Amino acid sequence: MDRAEKREFVTGLNGVFSNTGSVVVAHYAGLTVANMNELRSKMRAAGGTVKVAKNRLAIIALQGTESEGMKDLFKGQTLIAYADDPVAAPKVAADFAKANDKLVILGGAMGSTALDADGVKALATMPSLDELRAKIVGMIQTPATRIAAVVNAPAGNLARVFGAYARKDEAA
């Protein structure tokens, strides 16, 4: 890599560390090319990206960002996984790490909050933004359904009472 490529790489990583919802740092020693491609495709499907990080350049890119607290994680063969959705990258990385023990999650960052491996795994168990939206819509619709049932119930009861009186009068 020449200087221009390094400068471009650092600038791109600086933008990643500044603008993404969450970043996960992991060791990938021992992963095959097929495993890396599988991880990349799963991350891409979730709206994220996986990059192999050059540690020295990543530490330079971290300077001046909110995520600067995670610079100690960049030792050994590291990769970064990131996505705009704060839950997507940790969720995919944690799921892949469960299936493949060669991927070792070191930690990460969500905004200015530095996360250890347990913090990333806890973040991975949270529902995604789309799941939360669906739950909120469900909660909003449920009371409306209940209100409609309560409003319609007295009318139905009245109709049954009138029907019973009508049958009683017919029988008499």
Image (spheres, rainbow, N blue to C red):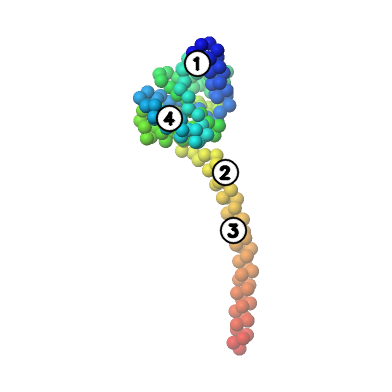
Q: For residue 12, say whether it is visible.
A: yes
Foreground disc of the pair 1, 3: 1
Amino acid, disc 1: Leu
Residue highlighted by disc 3: 146
Q: Mark 4 to mark 2: distance in Å?
A: 31 Å
Amino acid, disc 3: Arg
Q: Mark 1 to mark 3: distance in Å?
A: 57 Å
For marks 4 and 3 on the same chain, the one whose residue lies earlier in the sequence: 4
Foreground disc of the pair 3, 2: 2
Identified at 53% across, 43% down, the residue is 131
Q: Mark 3 to mark 2: distance in Å?
A: 20 Å
Amino acid, disc 4: Asn
Whether residue 38 sits left or right of residue 23 in the image: it is left
Q: Mark 4 to mark 3: distance in Å?
A: 48 Å
**Can you give x and y, in whole percent of width and height, for residue 55 in the image?**
46, 17
Quadrant in which residue 11 is drawn: top right
- Which dot marks residue 57? 1
Residue highlighted by disc 4: 37
Foreground disc of the pair 4, 3: 4
Identified at 42% across, 18% down, the residue is 75
Residue highlighted by disc 2: 133
Q: Residues within 10 Å of mark 4 (few under 14, many from 20)?
A: few
Q: Are marks 4 and 3 in contact (CB under 8 Å)?
A: no
Identified at 58% across, 48% down, the residue is 137
